[in-house]
């Protein structure tokens, strides 16, 4: 709808209101369409969410093992990576029976470095075990990994139905944030303030 060059103030106001109404209608329509699309998507079940959480942990174990095995880490960083690996394995031991109890299928562990890199690519992580040449490469890969793992738990918590699983997810997510802090400190030894950049972690989704 055009506005005449010689439009009166009343005509201008009327035209503006009409245009605004059309814009609002379009915006509202888009909002309703988005809501309908979300409603049409079936919600993930506890089995689905547990499967995603366990798959993230299985990958985390494989990546930490690969990074440690590279021999590129300084003693402090290697110590922290070993501690994180121990805890990632503990997460797998806790999540596996929980998933099995609900009838879920335990995700297979990537058996080779190439399989690990394929899984990293599928998760849109830039780093690869095959491209590790310095400790900086290792730390970057681990931080990207932890962001993805944290994001899996952050997404799962509001969707889980079982309160016990919500509590478990929150506990593990907090532990993953600790891993990210410990690994990040390797870039800034002793500077804990820089190693903890965010007050509230959400990860990457």
Image (cartoon, grey):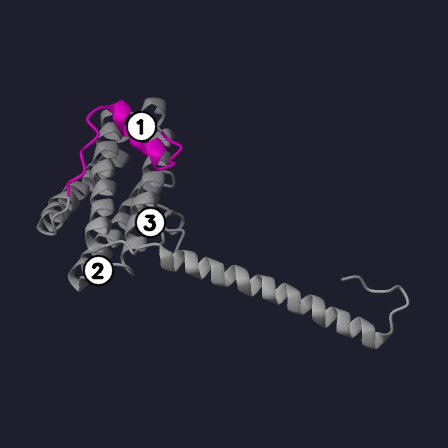
Residue 172: x and y in percent read 22, 52
Classify mark 1: helix, strand or loop.
helix
Classify mark 3: helix, strand or loop.
helix
Q: Which mark is residue 90?
A: none
Residue 84: x and y in percent read 21, 41
Q: Quadrant of the N terminus?
A: bottom right
Q: Which residues are magenta?
A: 105-127
Residue 94: x and y in percent read 12, 48
Residue at 34% x, 34% y is 122
Q: Which mark is residue 166?
A: 2
Number of other residues with Cα within 10 Å of mark 2, as a class: few under 14, some 14 to 19, many 20 or more: some
Query: Considering depth in this image, is 111 or 78 the residue closer to the camera?
Result: 111
**For marks 3 and 2 on the same chain, the one whose residue lies earlier in the sequence:** 3
**Rendering quarter of residue 39:** bottom left
Residue at 18% x, 64% y is 163
**Residue picked out by circle 1:** 117
**Residue picked out by circle 3:** 151
Query: Is there CB contact under 8 Å for labels 1 and 2?
Result: no
Classify mark 2: helix, strand or loop.
helix
């Amino acid at each position: 709808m055009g506005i005449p060059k010689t439009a009166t103030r009343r005509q201008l106001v009327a035209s503006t209101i009409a245009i605004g109404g059309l814009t609002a209608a379009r915006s509202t329509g888009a909002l309703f369409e988005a809501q309908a699309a979300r409603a049409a998507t079936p919600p993930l079940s506890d089995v689905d969410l547990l499967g995603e959480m366990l798959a993230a942990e299985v990958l985390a174990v494989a990546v930490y093992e690969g990074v440690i095995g590279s021999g590129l880490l300084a003693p402090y960083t290697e110590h922290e990576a070993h501690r994180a690996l121990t805890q990632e394995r503990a997460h797998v031991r806790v999540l596996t029976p929980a998933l099995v109890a609900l009838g879920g299928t335990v995700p297979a562990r990537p058996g080779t470095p190439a399989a690990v890199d394929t899984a990293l690519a599928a998760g849109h992580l830039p780093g690869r075990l095959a491209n590790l040449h310095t400790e900086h490469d290792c730390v970057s890969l681990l931080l990207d990994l932890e962001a993805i793992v944290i994001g899996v738990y952050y997404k799962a918590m509001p969707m889980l139905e079982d309160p016990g699983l919500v509590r478990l997810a929150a506990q593990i997510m907090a532990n993953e944030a600790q891993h990210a802090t410990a690994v990040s400190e390797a870039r800034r030894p002793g500077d804990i303030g820089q190693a903890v950049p965010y007050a509230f972690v959400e990860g990457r989704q």
